Amino acid sequence: MFFYRKKNKCSAVISNGIITKRSHSNIALIKYWGKHKKKIQIPLNSSISLSLKGVYTVTRLIYYIKKKKGNLSIRIFFSGKEKTSFLPKTVEFFRNILFYCSFLKDYNFIIETYNTFPHSSGIASSASSMSSLALCIMEMEKRLVSSLIKKDFFFKKASFLARLGSGSACRSIYSGLVVWGYHKSIKGSNNFYAIPYPYMVHSIFRKIEDTILIVDEKPKSILSSKGHQLMNENPYSRERFKCANKNMDRLISILKIGDFQEFGELVEHEALTLHAMIMTSNPYFLLMKPNTIKIIHSVWDFRMQNKKNIYFTLDAGANIHLLYPFEEKKFIKKWIYSDLFSFCKKIIESFCY
Ligand code: PMV
């Protein structure tokens, strides 16, 4: 579906150019953890995320025609400084997508990128960076191969390409609630690209605040690619995949009914299950820090005492996302800054839309 037939194999136009795109980070509610052993970035369960406003990557792709046929040349600049450490993942990404974007072989590239969130803040930037790069490449395809590409195809293929860079990146192509991975109850869901959540969502979930508490700024002690791989041998993985599927069904009905308490409990359960999988892999890892646990207990105590809708979720790391409805923002935010600030290195404000 996403590669060209023979007659379209060559670029229709050959020219130099510059493209700039931005893409938001996302936080998964039902987590993707575990992928197919032999295929590239095929998830073993479906996931759903919220795209985060204000937390994004801007990528400028400069493409220029190769003088001589041969190896791909890429230079990457992050916040104005050349970053050779980003090269291996980016080169691998270009290699993975070449079959679907054969026009790339005629060009060399300079990639300039920056994040709106602080560098080394502990927020995963691979989702927003890979998806913004995928959007740039689709824009290039539109300019050079087919100006008639329809909007729907543009985003589907961008999501497909982003997935080949980093699984969760395919969800960052869209705003709002986004699903990736086949689930029997979600029409159009599939393992190859993400789709906007297609069903009714109660108004309480239309604007969710996300306060991100940075407990640890250091890079994670486990790369997510390694973590996914370890799920193939994890003794609890089968149960995990079953549970994720059931949780998706539950979430569909929660999103419709508008029960924020059920929503939050499910999201917390998912976060702790992700960490349980990481802790029971071989080798095992413990990614939460003492302050992560202190914050979780403070959230539970505050919730009990004040009857407020505030719930946490985690990525594969020590940092915490606090999710709460926009309507309850004033009271909750005051508490976060007075009671949780001392456990954090930084606080980043975002909201899901
Ligand atoms: O996209 P990856 O390979 O970095 O994996 C991301 C996995 C989690 O962030 C832990 C969960 C998710 O679904 O985003």
Image: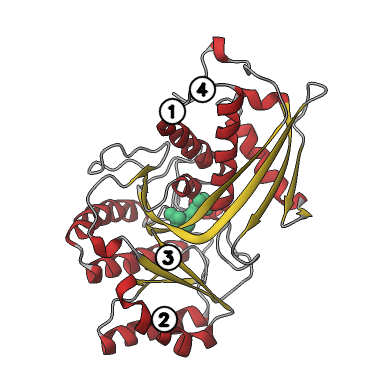
Badge nearest the viewer, 1 or 4: 1
Q: CA distance from mark 4 to mark 3?
A: 36 Å
> Pointer 2: what residue?
333
Mark 3, other Cα within 10 Å: few <14 / some 14–19 / many ≥20: many
Q: Earlier in the sequence, mark 4 or mark 3?
A: 4
Report helix, strand or loop for mark 1: loop
Report helix, strand or loop for mark 4: loop
Give whichever of 6, 47 is nearer the camera: 6
Badge nearest the viewer, 4 or 3: 3
> Pointer 3: what residue?
351
Give whichever of 328, 68 is nearer the camera: 328
**Discs 2, 4 touching: Cβ within 8 Å:** no
| Amino acid type at mark 4 | Phe
Rendering colour mode? secondary structure
> Pointer 1: what residue?
150
Q: Earlier in the sequence, mark 1 or mark 4?
A: 4
| Amino acid type at mark 1 | Lys
Q: Earlier in the sequence, mark 2 or mark 1?
A: 1
Q: CA distance from mark 1 to mark 3?
A: 29 Å
Say the numbered circle drawn on residue 3: 4
Q: CA distance from mark 2 to mark 3?
A: 13 Å
| Residue 166 drawn at (x, y percent) | 54, 46
| Amino acid type at mark 2 | Lys
Mark 1, other Cα within 10 Å: few <14 / some 14–19 / many ≥20: few
- Which residue is at a point 63% across and 65% down the rendered structure image? 219
163 versus 253 height, above or below: above
